[in-house]
Image (tube, coloured by chain):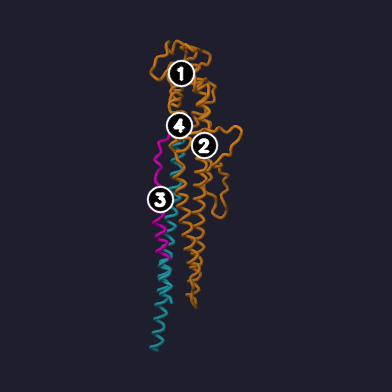
Amino acid sequence: MDVLTHLYANTAGLLARTDDALARWGAPQTHEVWPLLRRTGALPGDAVAALAGWSPQPWRDRAEELRRQADAAEALGERAGGLPGWEGAAGTAFRAAARQLDRDVTAWAGGLRADAAHLDDLARCLAAGRSRTARTLALVAGSAEAVTLVTAPAAGVPVGLPLASVLPGMAVPGAVLAGTAVGGLGPDGAGPVAWARAAAEIGAALLRAIDTTLTELDDLLAAGPAPADRPSAQAAPAAHVPPTDTTLRINL
Amino acid sequence: MTDELAATVDALADEMSRLRTALHRAAPGPLRLDVPGRMASLAGAADRAHGAAWSAHLDAASGFDTRLRELAGKVRTAGANYRAADEASEVA
C-alpha cells in the first residue's frame, strides 16, 4: 500500500464532500477547476479514487516477462547462428539461413526489450503521478479550504434558505456560482459560496496533478516504444522525487 | 552429421515453441479498471497498444518456430539426398 492509497483511505470523506459541493454549488464562473473538469472528465474525488486504484505493477510485471523472453530469444538466436554447416552448396545455404535466423531473432529480441522499456516508462510515469497526487492530497487535506468544506452540511441536509432565492441562476446541481451572491450562511459565516470556492480550490489542485499525469501518459503512449536499435528516447519522470524544501513528509 | 544437425535445429524450434507458449501465458488481459473520463480512454488505449504488441510478438515467435522446423526439414532432405547419391554411386 503506497502513500496515495493510505491518504485516499483517510481523505475519502473530504473528497466526497468536494465532489458533492461541486455538484451542488458549482464553482465561480472563471475558476480554473472548470477547464480541468472538462479535460479530465471526472470529479476530483472520482479521479483520485481511480488513480489510487490504478497500479503500475501490472506494467512492471509485463516488462519483466518481456525481458526474460528477450534473454531466451537472444541465446537461441546465437546458438542458431553458431550451427556448423558442411561442404557444398547445400551446406553454404544452410549456414546462410542459420545466420539470417540469428540476425532476425536478435532483432526481435531488441523489439521485446524496447516494449519492456516502454512499459517501464509508463509504470514510472504512473508511479510519479501517484506520488504527485498524494503530495497534493496531503496539502489540500490540511488546508483552510478543507476545514471550510468539512463544516459544510452533508448531501441531503437542507441549508436554510432555498438555493434559488439566494443564488440566482444556480438552482440545479453543477451550475455556475454567480460569485457575488452570499446566501444560506451558517453560524460561522460559511455558506454555499464559501463551500463552493473551497471545493473548487481543492478540486483544481487535485485535478491539476492528475491532468499532468494523464498528459504525460498520453504523450508516452503516442510516442510508443523507442526503436529497438537505440535506447529509450523517453525522458521518463523519475520514480523517486528527491526531497526539497517544499517536500511534504507524512508519517503513515 | 546432417541427422544430428537436423535434431539440433528441431531442438531450437522446440525451444522457440516453449518461448511462444510462455509469452502466450503472460499475455496481458484488460486491466479491468473502474476509472472515469479521460483516464478510462487512456487505460483503454494502453490496453489496446500492449495487446497488439503482444500479439505481434506471438506471431513473430510462431514464424521463427516455423522457419526452424523448415530448416530442420531441409537439412534432413539434404542428408537423404546425399545418402541416395552415395547409394547410387555404390551401385554404379
Q: Residues within 10 Å of mark 1 (few under 14, many from 20)?
A: some
In this figure, which residue is indicated by the disc labeled 3? B27
Precedes in sequence: disc 2 or disc 4 = 4
- The outermost residue toward the bottom is B92
Q: Which of the two discs, 2 and 3, sits closer to the camera?
A: 2
In this figure, which residue is indicated by the disc labeled 4? A8
Q: Looking at numbered disc 3 in the image, what kind of residue is underneath it?
A: Ala
Q: Is residue A218 left or right of residue B83?
A: right
Which mark is on residue A151? Answer: 1
- The outermost residue toward the right is A245
Chain B drawn in what color? Answer: cyan
Distance (Cα) linking label 2 and label 3: 28 Å
Q: Which chain is orange?
A: A
Distance (Cα) linking label 1 and label 2: 28 Å
Location of the C terminus of chain B (image quadrant):
bottom left
Label 1, secondary structure: give it.
loop
Q: Residues within 10 Å of mark 3 (few under 14, many from 20)?
A: some
Q: Which of B85/A85 is in front?
A: A85
Q: Looking at numbered disc 1 in the image, what kind of residue is underneath it?
A: Thr
Q: Does the magenta run of residues contain B25?
A: yes
**Residue range corresponding to the magenta coloring:** B12-37
Label 3, secondary structure: give it.
loop
Distance (Cα) linking label 3 and label 4: 31 Å
Q: Position of residue A140 (x, y in %)?
A: 52, 27
Q: Which of A57/B50 is in front?
A: A57
Q: Chain of mark 4?
A: A
Q: Position of residue A208 (x, y in %)?
A: 53, 31
Residue located 56% across and 43% down the image = A236
Residue A214 visible at all: no
